[in-house]
Image: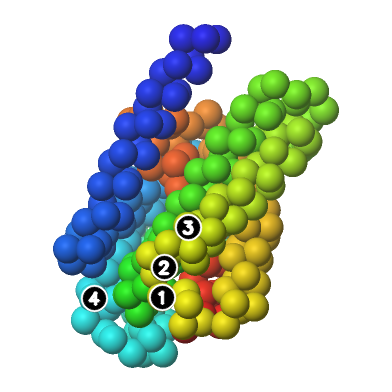
Amino acid sequence: MKKVMLTRIITGAFILLFTVAFVLLKQVSPLFFDAFVLIISVGAIYEINKAYKNVGKKVNWILLIFATLSMCLINIFVEDVSRVFIYDILLAMILFVALMLIDIIVFAVNRKNGTTEPDASVLNSTLFDQTKFTMMSFAYPVLLISSLYMLNHLPYDIGYMGIIVSFAVSMLTDTCALFVGVACGKRKFVPEVSPKKSVAGVVGGLIGGVIGAGLCFVIFYFTNWFALDGISLLKSISAFAIVGVIGSFINQLGDLVSSALKRKVGLKDFAHIFPEHGGFMDRVDGLMFVSTFVYVIFSLLLV
């Protein structure tokens, strides 16, 4: 147990240092952080494709990669935030139509070659499966992870704060939930979905998220690291308080969504890239929900 925990801590420290490096490189150019998000997105696509393949479901990973690259380029070159949303919706529509056409063409070819399943009930249950699971993968994780691109291209101070507080809330929520759960976790939270998650761990995670957002606010406000002094104090406190409390809850909800999907496809972890931490999906399952929430709150209250 001690060896496992030590490995987890060392790996976590490496992940933290790697993340901090790319966050700091944003000061040189936002393209460095875009590249970081792109790496995460491609890794997540690979893992989600592998997960669905584990239960015999196909995902068009080529089109998903295309969609991910397109979303990255949209955020880089489109400065108007409202237009980013429009282009993202348009991209989703193009992806959906392309997937439907591919499924129809494959079905027609198989029918012509006599390889299509003749049983109508089986056909109805599998028709457009690739479209369905690819669009599900576009929503989770591609679209949610793209919120990091969107934060990266908000006005400099707001976006930078949003990125830092997203990682702080997510990481401290996970860390506090783990250690409080190990130390005090006797009563299980939802064992049907996540056997290891305890009520004490959930409470510890909520406290961790609040601490993360609170520390960010104190550092940003009193060091004047970012231009918070130009924003109403009430708005600033409200934004960080909401992100701390609700963001921590949302982060843990993301963990549960990930756990439910893994149980559905028969996996313990999405991958084994990071010792005792799993894969990309295991590391960003809560972060992508938090960053989406932070983007919405910061856009409404601080921009």
How crowded is the residue under tag 2: few (<14 C-alpha within 10 Å), some, or many (20+)?
A: few
Residue 168: give x, y in percent of width and height: 49, 50
Q: Is residue 11 above or below residue 33?
A: above
Amino acid beneath label 3: Ile
Residue named by callout 3: 219
Residue named by callout 2: 224
Residue at (41% x, 31% y) in the render: 12
Q: Which of marks 2 and 3 is nearer the N terminus?
A: 3
Residue furthest left as drawn: 28
- Residue 76 shows which numbered tag? 4
Look at the numbered discs 2 and 4 and tell me whether their residues touch, using CB distance below 8 Å: no
Amino acid beneath label 4: Ile
CA separation in Å, label 3 and label 1: 12 Å
Amino acid beneath label 1: Ala
The quarter of the image holding the N terminus is top right
- Residue 227 shows which numbered tag? 1
CA separation in Å, label 2 and label 4: 27 Å
Q: Is residue 14 above or below residue 45?
A: above
Q: Which of marks 3 and 1 is nearer the N terminus?
A: 3
CA separation in Å, label 1 and label 2: 6 Å
Q: In this view, does 181 lie to the left or right of 117?
A: right
Amino acid beneath label 2: Asn
- Residue 38 shows which numbered tag? none
Q: Earlier in the sequence, mark 4 or mark 3?
A: 4
Choose mark 1 or mark 2, whichever is in front.
Answer: 2
Q: Quadrant of residue 31?
A: bottom left
